[in-house]
Structure formats: structure tokens, C-alpha cells
Image: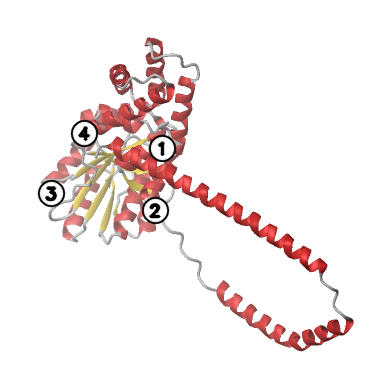
Amino acid sequence: MGLFDIFKKRNNEEENNNSKVEEIKNDETDAVVDDEQKSDDKVEQASEQETVTCEEEQQSTDQEDSKESDVEDNSDKEKVEQQSDDEQPAAEKPVEDDQTKFTEGLEKSRSTFGQRLNRLFANFRSVDEDFFEDLEDTLIESDVGFDMAVNLTDQLRDEVKLQNAKSKDDVQNVIIQKMIDIYDQNGNDENTEIHFSDQGPTVILFVGVNGVGKTTTIGKMANMYKQQGKKVLLAAADTFRAGAIQQLDEWAKRDGVDIVKKPEQSDPSAVVYEAVHKAKDENYDILFVDTAGRLQNKVNLMNELAKMKKVLTREIPDAPHEVLLVLDSTTGQNALNQAKLFKETTNVSGIVLTKLDGTAKGGIVLAIRNELHVPVKYVGLGEKVEDLREFNANDFVYGLFKGLIK
């Protein structure tokens, strides 16, 4: 089953669920109306009854007095029980499943893309060349990338004719279907899983420009693997940026994992050398290596990365097992340009997209797969530690296009 078929199935299931919820609400409304009518009938019957005699009233009062002490006793017991309930620990809030998290995290991107489609179709008359030019501009604005926008527009010219799509709803459905199909085809051989070493520590090298959330991503991943029972070690090899070592050290303390660090301006390769020996000698499962990210010193930066990789490979022949490029999704096409630059000079095996929940530029995931063919392996869908999630193409597609099929 292709991505579009999975998406359509989920979309239909949600629509059916919404319809059932609406039916339940209507049934409940009818029930309330019936109850109100019965209540009115009872009031009318009560008003027609004879008023009770004074003797009956006195008798009722005596009975109430005799029960008063019992009521007070019961009230005291209820207070004690209530107090006991209040002292019980509150139930932990369940962690949201990935599908829900993706749907919520991509709300801004989905809403913005929907608005752009609405704007495109506001003056829709026919599927002519002017329409396709406007569509191409709309797709580029949505950060799906220039190449994908042109490719998609060219394919849609034939697809619209093939499916005889004439109404704007039909054309919109074809657009979304084609986007999902192209994205699906480009990811046929994509593997989003982390590659672990068969024996000895798994070494994961993190690269990326300053300010994209590299150190925070390492802290969140360290916490995740620590919770899975892994023995984790951090290497603070970003020795040039002020505060980078302290920031990673703070994450190590928070996560309860170990760290290898040296003073600022130290040789990054020396940090890596010490860290990889510690990881081997003390049987760590995972070694995370933080690196510097100054683009203005491109040559020096890439030389430093090459030195670190040489140290790693000398100690562990197949290391690093992963080179994860961290990108800030809020920067859109700029993130794509960064990815191209690092891919030219480094063997990037996967991408971590941060701040995906805080941007309307979620289409950048489509551009990355279409132009770079590097798998997105993790995405940031919130600020909490648990909001770093493994990337799932099905959940992503559903979160980005949910409700947009007409």
C-alpha cells in the first residue's frame, strides 16, 4: 500500500469518526430535550396535588430531626474519604502517540499550505498555463523546493488531463495525491533507522551550523537512549563556541549520563580521542560527539571534521556509524542550502529537523527527500525532552495534508 492510499484511509477513518461523534452529540441533545419535557410534566403533576396537612409536616420535621445526627456522621465520613482521595497521587498524563504528535506539530504547516491553496483557487476558472504558473509559485512559497515545484507542475499537466479533473476540488485532490506519490517514490530505498554497531560502542557524530539546536538534540537523544537502558557517553568537541561545553555538560547532568570535556579552545580531536577510548574501555553502548559549526570558516570547519573522523576510524574502524546533520526547519530553504553544503563535504547519513512544530515550513521535508535523498531520521515536535520523535513518513504525510482532500 502506497503513502497516498495510507493517507486516504486515515483521512476517511477520521471523517467517519467525526460523523459518529456528531451523531452521538445529536442523540445526547435529543435525550436532554426528553428529560426536560419529563421534568416539566412532573412539576405540573406536583402542582396539582393537595398540600400536605400541618400534622404531616410536623411528623416530617420530627423525622428529619432524628436523622440529623446520622447525616452529620455521614458527612464527616465523606470528608475523610474525600481528604484521602485528595492525597492520592495524580495520574500521570499519558504520552501522546506519534500520529497525534505529528498531526499537532504540523498544524502550522498544514494550515498555511491550505490557505495558499485557497488563495490559488480563489479566482479559479480553468486549468490553463496561468494556473500552472501560479501553482508553481505557491509550491515554492510552501518550501517544497524549486526542483520539486517544477517537477510536480510538469507531472500535473498530464495527470489533470488523465483524470479529467475540471472542478477546483478535483484539481486540488490531484495536486495533493501527486505530491504524496512523488515523495513516496523518492523514498523507496530510504532507511530512517539508526545504524548500531554489531559490537562495541556505536558512535554518532552530530554536525550543523551554530544555533540550529545541535546540542539540545544530543541532550534529548541521550535521555531517550538512557531511558531504553543504554549506557551513554557525550563528547564535548565543540570547543570553539562560548558556552557550548557548559550547555552539553548541563544536559549530561540532567540526563544522568557521562561526558568527556576539556577547556574552551582545546583541540576537538583530543576530546574525541579521549572519549572514544573511554567508550571502548568502559563498555559504553553509545557515544554522541558534538561538533562546531561555523560556516564562515568552511575550510577549517571541514578539516576539523575530517580530523575527528580520522581519530574515530583509527580506534573503531567502522566509526562513525552515523553522521547526523541537524537543521532548523524554521529557516526553510536556508536549511536546504546548509544540507547541500554539508553533504558535499561530509558523509551525512541522516538529518534531524528541529522546531518543526513552530514553523509553517514543513514542506522542507519534501524538498530534502526530493533534492538530497538523505533520510530525515528525527524531528523536533516540541520543547519537551520526549518531543524529539523518530521520523515516520506515514505520520508526516497525514499530519501535513490531513483534511485537505476535498
* In the depicted structure, whether residue 329 falls above or below residue 26: above
In the image, residue 116 above or below residue 20: above
Extreme residue in the bottom direction? 66
Quarter holding the C terminus? top left
Q: Secondary structure at mark 2?
A: helix
The circle drawn on residue 159 is none
| Amino acid type assigned to the residue bearing label 2 in the image | Glu
Q: CA distance from mark 4 to mark 3?
A: 18 Å
Residue holding disc 1: 402
Kindly report the distance in space between the C-alpha atoms of the residues bearing marks 2 and 1: 39 Å
Seen in the image, is 335 located left or right of residue 1?
A: right
Q: Does residue 243 appear in the picture of this structure? A: no
Q: In what element is the residue under mark 4?
A: loop
Of the residues under marks 4 and 3, which one precedes in the sequence? 3
First along the sequence among labels 1 and 3: 3
Judging by the rendered image, the residue that carries numbered circle 2 is 250
Report x, y in % for residue 189: 18, 36
- Please state which of the two labelled residues, at mark 1 or mark 3, is closer to the viewer: 1
Real-space CA distance between mark 1 and mark 3, rounded to the nearest whole angstrom: 45 Å
Mark seen at residue 316: 3
**Residue at mark 4:** 346
